[in-house]
Image (cartoon, grey):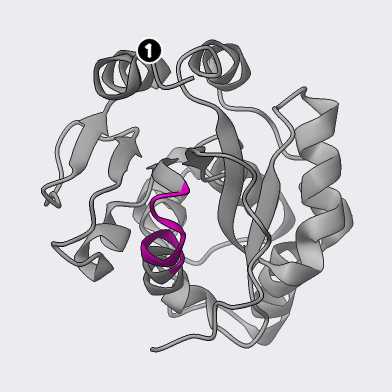
């Protein structure tokens, strides 16, 4: 998948990017909880079991109906819905501390472009740093989000020196020549790229960024 990346927003200065879903926003949990309360499921699993089996692994059950698919797509593409999503504990406090080490210059998310207004509003509501927002083009399927994001990171380096992101699957699409840092949030171990570090929680993200980028700001 070779993309035309010439229309990406301009990045002011040199700094770090942040993913949003499951890094800043507890999106999957919110979706799973609302879905569980809206629809019945033939497996009779609990809400926690449902989340761990399907949402946490981005797998759609075989028993999904067209109505369920439509429900998911409506929320995936809804700008207004993004404003309602909960924060991940410790995200905003740690991001503000990270700003003292390395500037936050971009948010790179596989959310579709249709969600930009709501996503910007959500970032403002919670007090995240002002930075360029890069969303996935509508023409790229959500399953290709990790591949798209890897190409964006390669293209933006060295203006964007790395990213905090929860999805380790992106690493398989980064070339071994990529010199930016990837801080894999909410993981203790993963199949790593040479430039990647796993970070089980936001305090660990802060420590790793301090180690790599101390003095860059």
Of helix, strand and loop, which one carries label 1? helix
116 displayed left or right of 188? right
Q: Residue at x 50, y 67 (%)?
A: 42
Residue drawn where x is 68% and y is 61% of the image: 9
Observer able to see residue 26: no
Image position, residue 54 (x, y; %): 41, 59
Q: Nearer the viewer, residue 87 or 105?
A: 105
**Magenta segment range?**
152-159
Residue 192 % position (x, y): 13, 49
Q: Position of residue 61 (x, y in %)?
A: 44, 72
Quarter placement of the N terminus: bottom left
| Number of numbered discs overlaid on the protein picture | 1
Q: Would residue 158 be counted in the magenta stretch?
A: yes
The foreground one among 1 and 216 is: 216
Q: Main secondary structure of the magenta part?
A: helix
- Seen from the viewer's position, the closer of residues 82 and 120 is 120
Q: Residue at the spot x=43%, y=80% of the render?
A: 62
Instruction: Give the vertical position of 19 relative to 177 (above or below).
Output: above
Q: Is residue 50 left or right of residue 176?
A: right
Give the residue displayed 84% in from the left and 51% down from the top. 118
Placement of 189 over or under 214, stated as above or below: below
Q: Quadrant of residue 161?
A: top left
- Residue that label 1 marks: 203
Label 1 Cα crowd, 10 Å radius (few <14 / some 14-19 / many 20+): few
Question: In the figure, residue 149 lies in which quadrant?
Answer: bottom left
**Among the 4 quarters of the image, the one containing residue 105:** top right
Q: In the figure, is residue 217 to the left or right of 170? A: right
> Vertically, is 97 above or below 189?
above
């Amino acid at each position: 998948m070779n993309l035309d990346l010439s229309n990406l927003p301009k990045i002011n200065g040199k700094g770090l990017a942040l993913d949003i879903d499951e890094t800043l926003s507890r999106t999957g949990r919110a979706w799973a909880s609302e879905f569980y309360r809206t629809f019945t499921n033939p497996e009779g699993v609990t809400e926690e079991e449902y989340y761990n089996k399907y949402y946490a692994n981005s797998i759609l059950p075989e028993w999904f109906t067209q109505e369920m698919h439509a429900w998911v797509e409506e929320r995936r593409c809804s700008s207004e819905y993004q404003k309602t999503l909960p924060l991940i504990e410790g995200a905003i406090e740690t991001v503000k501390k990270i700003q003292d080490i390395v500037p936050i210059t971009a948010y790179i998310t596989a959310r579709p472009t249709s969600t930009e207004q709501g996503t910007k509003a959500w970032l403002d509501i919670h007090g995240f740093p002002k930075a360029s927002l890069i969303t996935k083009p509508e023409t790229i399927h959500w399953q290709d989000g990790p591949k798209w994001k890897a190409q964006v990171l390669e293209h933006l380096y060295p203006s964007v020196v790395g990213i905090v992101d929860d999805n380790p699957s992106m690493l398989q699409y980064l070339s071994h020549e990529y010199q930016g840092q990837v801080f894999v949030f909410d993981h203790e171990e993963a199949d790593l790229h040479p430039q990647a570090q796993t970070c089980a929680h936001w305090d660990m993200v802060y420590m790793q960024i301090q180690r790599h980028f101390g003095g860059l700001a």
